[in-house]
């Protein structure tokens, strides 16, 4: 886990998370970037990788390039003032995925992805604010971060720029960051990060943001799929002499009461939110592994034997696991679906959701239960779980 140094974890969760920024010096002592700038550039040449380059030409003059790139792109870049950004690095490089383990003091299903940036001296993406929480880990080199809480709204965007940059940026705080330092930012805090050398690499551990409209639409879709909430609207007691064109307060009360009735179904809400929290975005869905073919799939007995000799099982980094507690058995959700648990033990369900991998020692006792074995076999056939190499 990251080291908060001057405060403890309860203080961070209570006083800082989604409230105010925090500078965390030497949060990951001895941290070494698992990916070099050259490897990052190599990834940007690939079609399936989401990559961007931002070049600053003047004070408020920025150019945005979208990948995939080629070697000619890099040959034409200026010596300074540009930044390469690669999205979803935790789904591409296992060593980057492992960084998420240092942030397990927050729910894993809240994480969106890890974006990695490399910048030459002066490189930056402009002053801006986000609508989500983010931990900005300085992975290599040095970066200057300037912060503001002022004018963080959509009326303060520079017009005619592909990036959503702040036109007015009144610096309130100014810091220099070295490798291992972390800056935590809650939503709607303006920030401007400028590379101070040609070694600058920053890892952005971003968290999902949910707008109320998104929740409402998703809940409606869930009700339709589950064929729930078919109750009929019932009129209020109409009064004689009404105005035929008026929608009365009493009519609105009836509609409100009907909507509120479904929101009181706690079990239904848990099921919906478990699915919602584990949904994949479009890019991630396209990165799901190919399931094993019928020819590639051994018997469940052979699979059980392999579990006793392999190092263990690890989740595919694209997949999102979560569970909700119920009265008898935790409900498992994977990639936006309610998952068949095959009668697995509650311990098995919780471990699958809570842990990135299961060791051979853990599996040796768990697979004695047929429900546990059936669940693991199901996920292995889909390659949502794979053997640890």
Image (cartoon, grey):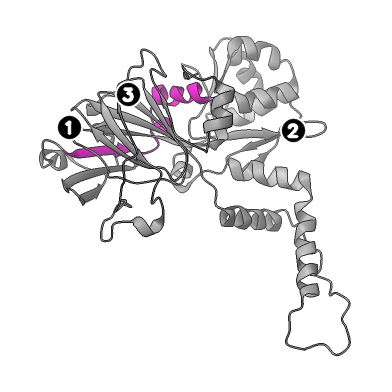
Q: State which mark lies toward you, 2 or 3.
A: 3
Mark 1 touches mark 3? (CB < 8 Å) = no
Residue at 34% in and 42% down: 50
Residue at 38% in and 46% down: 129
Residue at 85% in and 74% down: 236
Q: Position of residue 104 (x, y in %)?
A: 54, 24
| Helix, strand or loop at mark 3 | strand
**Eyeballing the image, is 215 above or below 54?**
below
Relative to 66, is 106 on the left or the right?
right
Checking the image for residue 139, the label placed there is 3
Q: Badge 2 is on which residue?
A: 325
Name the image quarter holding residue 183.
Answer: top left
Q: Cα distance, mark 2 to mark 1?
A: 50 Å
Q: Position of residue 159 (x, y in %)?
A: 28, 60
Q: Badge 1 is on which residue?
A: 121
Residue at 19% in and 27% down: 197
Q: Inspect the magenta stretch and tell me whether residue 99 lies in it.
A: yes
Question: Between 318 and 310, which is closer to the camera in this rendering?
Answer: 318
- Which segment is the magenta one? 81-103
| Helix, strand or loop at mark 1 | loop
Q: Position of residue 316 (x, y in %)?
A: 50, 29
Question: Between 227 and 205, which is closer to the camera in this rendering?
Answer: 205
Classify mark 3: residues with Cα within 10 Å, few (<14), some (14-19) or many (20+). many
Ranked by sequence position, the earlier of labels 1 and 3 is 1
Q: Cα distance, mark 2 to mark 3?
A: 37 Å
Name the image quarter holding residue 238.
Answer: bottom right
Q: Inspect the magenta stretch and tell me whether residue 149 lies in it.
A: no
Question: Between 296 and 258, which is closer to the camera in this rendering?
Answer: 258
| Helix, strand or loop at mark 2 | loop
**Eyeballing the image, is 56 above or below 31?**
below
């Amino acid at each position: 886990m990251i080291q908060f140094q001057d405060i403890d974890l309860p203080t961070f969760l209570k006083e800082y998370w989604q409230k105010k920024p925090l500078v965390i010096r030497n949060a990951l002592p001895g941290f070494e970037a698992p990916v070099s700038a050259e490897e990052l550039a190599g990834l940007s040449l690939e079609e399936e990788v989401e990559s961007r380059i931002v070049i600053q030409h003047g004070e408020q003059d920025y150019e945005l390039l979208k990948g995939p790139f080629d070697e000619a792109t890099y040959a034409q870049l200026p010596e300074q003032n540009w930044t390469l950004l690669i999205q979803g690095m935790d789904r591409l490089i296992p060593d980057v995925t492992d960084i998420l383990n240092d942030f397990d003091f927050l729910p894993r299903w809240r994480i969106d992805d890890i974006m990695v940036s490399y910048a030459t001296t002066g490189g930056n993406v402009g002053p801006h604010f986000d609508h989500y929480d983010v931990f900005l880990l300085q992975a290599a080199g040095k970066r200057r971060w300037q912060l503001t809480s002022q004018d963080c709204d959509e009326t303060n965007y520079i017009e005619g720029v592909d990036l959503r940059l702040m036109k007015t940026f009144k610096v309130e705080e100014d810091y220099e960051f070295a490798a291992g330092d972390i800056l935590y930012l809650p939503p709607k805090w303006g920030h401007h990060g400028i590379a101070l050398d040609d070694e600058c690499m920053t890892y952005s551990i971003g968290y999902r943001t949910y707008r109320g409209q998104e929740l409402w639409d998703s809940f409606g879709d869930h009700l339709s799929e589950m064929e729930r909430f078919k109750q009929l609207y019932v009129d209020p007691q109409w009064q004689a002499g009404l105005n035929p064109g008026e929608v009365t307060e009493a009519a609105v009360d009836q509609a409100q009461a009907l909507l509120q009735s479904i929101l009181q179904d706690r079990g239904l809400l848990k099921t919906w939110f478990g699915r919602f929290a584990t949904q994949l975005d479009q890019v991630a869905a396209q990165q799901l592994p190919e399931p094993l073919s019928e020819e590639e799939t051994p018997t469940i007995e052979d699979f059980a034997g392999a579990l006793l000799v392999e190092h263990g099982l690890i989740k595919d980094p694209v997949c999102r696991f979560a569970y909700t507690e119920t009265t008898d058995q935790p409900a498992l959700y994977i990639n936006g679906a309610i998952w068949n648990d095959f009668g697995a033990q509650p311990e098995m369900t919780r471990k699958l959701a809570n842990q990135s991998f299961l060791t051979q020692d853990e599996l040796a006792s768990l697979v004695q239960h047929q429900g546990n074995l059936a669940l693991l076999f199901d996920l292995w056939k889909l390659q949502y779980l794979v053997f640890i190499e």
